[in-house]
Image (cartoon, coloured by chain):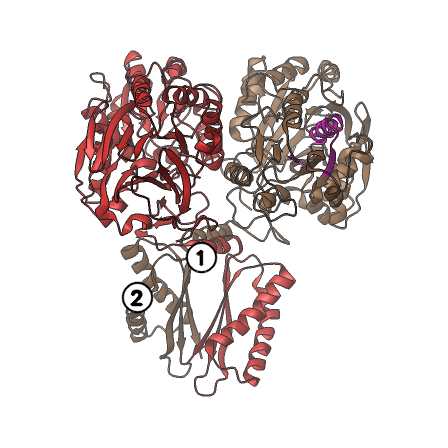
Chain colours: A brown, B red
Amino acid sequence: MSHPHPELATPPALPKGGVRVVALGGLGEVGRNMTVIEYDGRLLIVDCGVLFPEDHPGVDLILPDFEYIADRLDDVEAIVLTHGHEDHIGAVPYLLRLKPDLPLVGSTLTLALIEAKLKEHRITPYTLGVKEGGREVLGAFDCEFVAVNHSIPDALAVFIRTPGGTLLHTGDFKMDQLPLDGRITDLRAFGRLGEEGVDLFLTDSTNAEVPGFTTPERDIAPAIERVFAKAERRIIVACFSSHVHRVQQVLDAAEANGRKVAMVGRSMVRNMGIAADLGYLHVPDGVLVDVKKLGDLEDNKVVLVCTGSQGEPMAALSRMANRDHRIDVGEGDTVLMASSLIPGNENAVYRVINGLMHLGAKVVHKGNAMVHVSGHASAGELLYCYNIVKPRNVMPVHGEWRHLIANADLAVATGVPRERVVLAEDGVVVDLIDGKAAITGAVPCGYVYVDGSLVGTTDETMLKDRRILRDEGFVTIIVVRDADTGKIAAGPEIQTRGFAEDEAIFDKVVPKIESALEEARAKGINDTYQLQQVIRRAVGGFMGGKLRRRPMIIPIVIDA
Amino acid sequence: MSHPHPELATPPALPKGGVRVVALGGLGEVGRNMTVIEYDGRLLIVDCGVLFPEDHPGVDLILPDFEYIADRLDDVEAIVLTHGHEDHIGAVPYLLRLKPDLPLVGSTLTLALIEAKLKEHRITPYTLGVKEGGREVLGAFDCEFVAVNHSIPDALAVFIRTPGGTLLHTGDFKMDQLPLDGRITDLRAFGRLGEEGVDLFLTDSTNAEVPGFTTPERDIAPAIERVFAKAERRIIVACFSSHVHRVQQVLDAAEANGRKVAMVGRSMVRNMGIAADLGYLHVPDGVLVDVKKLGDLEDNKVVLVCTGSQGEPMAALSRMANRDHRIDVGEGDTVLMASSLIPGNENAVYRVINGLMHLGAKVVHKGNAMVHVSGHASAGELLYCYNIVKPRNVMPVHGEWRHLIANADLAVATGVPRERVVLAEDGVVVDLIDGKAAITGAVPCGYVYVDGSLVGTTDETMLKDRRILRDEGFVTIIVVRDADTGKIAAGPEIQTRGFAEDEAIFDKVVPKIESALEEARAKGINDTYQLQQVIRRAVGGFMGGKLRRRPMIIPIVIDA
């Protein structure tokens, strides 16, 4: 576990009456949101999500680092989940592996989504359902829940009352004033809580750099309608499998245009099933059809809703673009990518778009039509929030450093004193004492990698090895020594993979290895490890000097 | 060499009087632009650029595939270079390695830039300088050059007259009506040539998906001025090292604000030196200063212009963000990233922005200010072009499939018949016969990778190996056999790198290997290669079945 802030010491014990806030994820990155709040020795956790890897070869997911709380799980009152997105709930199964009876608190949809996920991990959690306006005393933490509007239904902010002070955590949110489900961010509650006094306001920074106001979800309806009006054959919609309102718009358009809709992809089928069962998705009568029954319908009566909007190679849409899916996209089909383009996914997404267009499909996407709006509050909305809440202290959450700074600047612009705005990263300890929040130290907080079925085994050294193998490949040199005489009995045998140079170059290297080993033997060096180092130096010198290559060098000396 | 279009046959011989056009790069991708035009057995090449790798581990550059012309270099009249960007001139050194006396034709700045590049490759080329309005008969090809406006000065379109028909190739261009240097795309010439008759119009597709008109370069002046007005300490500008006009605006702002400018980074110093010497960059008296002299100046009198706007890890700006550069960016400094964000570079660029902000700098970039405009014509400009030229046939060039299709749709919208718009990719043969252009076949056209000092050695198999090594690592199993008895003398010895699982799992694998080898021996299998396959199967089965891992497996049997 690395220490992210060597300049910050381990914090002092939390003074009596103080509240401590430590984010184990989500500060300095977009993802793995997790905040630990402490009062009087008791802990409350807000969210527990995953981060998707960027340049982490072979890594499937990145988790928050639980080390800080691993020995204190008995002190945890509950895990409050603000909404059902992966970057807020995805790491819950891994935390519950450590203590399966940690109670999960959240709204109906949020709990349904985490329960479905936990079922795959064969965990049945303890849950407590809550609603906006509801209040639950979770041990030392008196929690009130506030409706917020986001790109998934049933999202909540949480107001936490402790004897040491109050905290308002927004979770992810935006302030669409005419949302599809009529459920707006409850600014009246924000105002009332501000009136009561918000000592620390933790606010979503994701879109703090974006000027103005996030476009309402319903403003994409015209673009969807245009797709339906013009489509000659099938319509294939790709979006996030949790975006209930986006799918709602597609269902409504399908009904209005006399088309049937089939869901494609495991997570899409599962999540929309949950949303429909719980009443968050309103499926018009007879509009849904099983994907296997599509053969019975004319192409111009069909809509497919599938996953893969980020170019994920195994998702339905990528496989269609590669002609590796039973839906054979072709001339006259229209693909609607109704989603964001997450930074880093551009090449994969454009590859899918080019592939689909190559097959003859029309592709409507964010780049050429108004088919996506963000789920996060832009700068203009955040200003409203600060002015309504009038917090005593602010701690921007959820975002890279550039987002946190932009959010901090907005708070200051509304009159929050600069010294009352705390810019912290993962692992940084923020203590709220006598109404003032300040950084008091840092705790170990590294990256925990999920690699296949292994959690926390893959480390930075492993990733460094994989990057070297990726860029330069490896060279293995095997020498077999006669166990009795100590002389070379076979080899040097050389194997390379991923290594650019012709193997003929080893005609020059082998004599160097042999003479280096001879020299070592003359000096009385017999230890296998030392001889391996001799080989490494001989080969490495040649690679770096002559060839300017830095492959991984694996010398192996075996006695036989 | 792969064949990109298995459905297309080798084309028939070009009929007498026909003109053949084959792009060896730039169609279906953004980069390595190169078009080969043939008439009566003679060839003219337009541009010869490089493509930057995306998911090509260990690859430095991607070149056009010269195989199609490799045996016909004596037929090449000349290489016309439309402008000095890497994706149009970067592969010239590699082509000249095959035949150093191929003449290069281009404008003054273009030739100066390619000559500087060729000097590094120790090649002195034959060159022919041309100017807008000029006309040169290059063997069978009577070429007239037309001024076009782009994000580098002195760009040219080329109109090629042959007895078999005329071609107008735009190169990269846009139609800024008030460019900084007053040199507009010469639509009057486009009109005159259209009047004479353009049989095939090859047009830049890069921005064909973008509606409307590209913003003029001078419209970013206010944002630059705001940076200068507000900056407290140093101003550090990052932009492309060929963007003379962008740097011109920075020099002018520096002069107006009493600051001195230092160039940082090898390519920036070199290119701006060339541009200043040739009169394309106007350096106000006394504004330039050597970077080593910066210590003598107050921080608020300093501007640095450097490379690294795409987050390139070795460029000046990335190194500043990592505190690995003698310019120690800190509180009060302002960084202006006056450049595009090329798709695929987002993560690298945001990493640099976050790093700089972490050090206390303000960062002004495309995402939060109007500090960049594109160098390519948007849809609105392309419509003007089609209406002015009124070409008989159109072949969209420079772009991914989505760009080529968007450009084709624009041509059709202006009245070019759909069957006169040729959508081709690299290697596809387009013949202009009796005034009609059509696809007649395809030629081999693969990717040629530059990997360190090697050109064309690294192939798809190598890249596949590197991707496996990156994601899954490798497992080497070494068995030493007694050459006399055939029995195992040592091993199985196992080595892994980049492989996620604990080595303890091999306690289970080793007995499987031993019994598989025993069994093979009982069957009389003695061949080393066959025994290696036995080991591979034993290990691979365990990895795939039990662990769901697919590492590279390297079995080695050595006789000693």
Q: How many marks?
A: 2
Q: Which residues are magenta?
A: A233-262
Q: Is residue B355 visible?
A: no
Check residue A513 in the rendering and tell me which mark sits there, or answer none: none
Residue A330 inside the magenta-drawn segment:
no
Q: Is residue B316 visible?
A: yes
Q: Position of residue A315 (x, y in %)?
A: 62, 44
Disc 1 marks a residue whose amino acid type is Thr
**Tag 2, which secondary structure?**
helix
Q: Quadrant of residue B308?
A: top left
Tell me what residue is drawn at x 50 percent, y 44 percent. A55
**Which residue in the structure is indicated by mark 1?**
B461
User: Between A113 and A41, which is closer to the camera in this rendering?
Assistant: A113
Q: Is residue B443 left or right of residue A397?
A: left
**Which residue in the structure is indicated by mark 2?**
A509
Q: Position of residue A378 (x, y in %)?
A: 59, 20
User: Between A9 and B244, which is closer to the camera in this rendering?
Assistant: B244
Mark 2 surroundings: few (<14), some (14-19) or many (≥20) residues within 10 A: some
Q: Is residue B232 left or right of residue A99?
A: left
Tell me what residue is drawn at x 63 percent, y 34 percent. A22
Location of residue A493 with respect to A337 vertically, above or below: below
**Tag 1, which secondary structure?**
helix
Mark 1 surroundings: few (<14), some (14-19) or many (≥20) residues within 10 A: few
Write down the chain letter for disc 2: A
